[in-house]
């Protein structure tokens, strides 16, 4: 995640250097670890960028265009952005379910071990015929080890899950903010180009 966040910041810095919102595509190969760059690449693909980074005038898939200029509609670009962001979030949080499952189940596994240990301790009491502390304490102490082990596993897992969940949300927020900025820039570019037409 640290590498991904650093790559995102590098790409955003590179993106801000270009006047045209799609010209940053010429640097995509330098930002392979960036989730923001991956989202940008999906939008750039909609515009069929040429090798020089200039946006192409025609789109091969006519049904997604506006029919007049041959460029993708804003609605289509927003759909592409939404799918690309969801794909990147899914890739980023791929290991979080393991932490969540560990944090949720290990206390119950520990409790199960404790219950079985106490049952065994009571069975030992029945066999010895005495309920003295000397007879009960070793079995109960051994049973509580399972609870301690479950909590020892669950607490760090829950802390790690919450920590990484916050980082995933931060990455998702960065992608959402970039998506809004990109769609606004593309829309403004389209308005300016329309205004220049006679």
Image (cartoon, grey):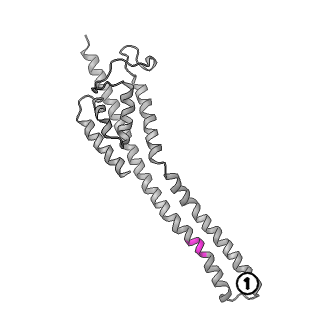
Q: Nearer the viewer, residue 182 or 102?
A: 102
Q: Is residue 163 left or right of residue 52?
A: right
Which residue is located at x 25 percent, y 36 percent? Answer: 16
Q: Is residue 82 left or right of residue 131?
A: left
Q: Is residue 21 magenta?
A: no
Residue wearing tag 1: 125
Q: Nearer the viewer, residue 52 or 107?
A: 52
Q: Is residue 92 left or right of residue 123?
A: left
Which quadrant: the C terminus? top left
State which quadrant residue 73 falls in: top left
Q: Position of residue 140 (x, y in %)?
A: 64, 79
Compared with residue 21, is residue 90 higher up or lower down, i.e. above or below?
A: below
Q: Position of residue 13 (x, y in %)?
A: 26, 41
Q: Nearer the viewer, residue 52 or 193?
A: 52
- Mark 1 residue element: helix
Which residue is located at x 58 percent, y 75 percent? Answer: 145
Which residue is located at x 58 percent, y 65 percent? Answer: 107
Q: Position of residue 132 (x, y in %)?
A: 69, 89
Q: Position of residue 100 (x, y in %)?
A: 53, 56
Compared with residue 11, is residue 20 higher up or lower down, i.e. above or below?
A: above
Within 10 Å of the Cα at label 1, are there few (<14), some (14-19), or many (20+) other Cα atoms? some
Which residue is located at x 38 percent, y 48 percent? Answer: 170
Query: Which portion, as a residue range, is magenta?
Result: 144-148
């Amino acid at each position: 995640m640290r590498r991904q966040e650093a790559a995102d910041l590098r790409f955003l810095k590179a993106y801000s250097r270009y006047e045209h919102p799609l010209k940053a595509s010429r640097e995509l190969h330098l930002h392979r670890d960036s989730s923001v760059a991956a989202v940008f690449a999906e939008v750039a693909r909609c515009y069929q960028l040429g090798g020089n980074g200039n946006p192409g005038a025609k789109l091969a898939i006519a049904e997604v265009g506006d029919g007049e200029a041959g460029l993708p509609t804003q609605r289509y670009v927003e759909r592409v952005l939404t799918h690309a962001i969801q794909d990147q979030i899914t890739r980023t949080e791929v290991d979080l379910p393991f932490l969540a499952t560990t944090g949720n189940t290990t206390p119950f596994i520990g409790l199960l071990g404790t219950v079985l240990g106490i049952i065994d301790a009571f069975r030992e009491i029945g066999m010895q015929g005495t309920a003295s502390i000397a007879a009960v304490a070793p079995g109960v102490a051994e049973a509580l080890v399972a609870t301690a082990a479950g909590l020892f596993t669950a607490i760090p897992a829950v802390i790690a899950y919450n920590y990484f969940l916050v980082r995933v949300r931060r990455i998702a927020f960065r992608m959402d903010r970039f998506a809004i900025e990109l769609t606004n820039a593309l829309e403004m570019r389209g308005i300016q180009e329309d205004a220049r037409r006679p």
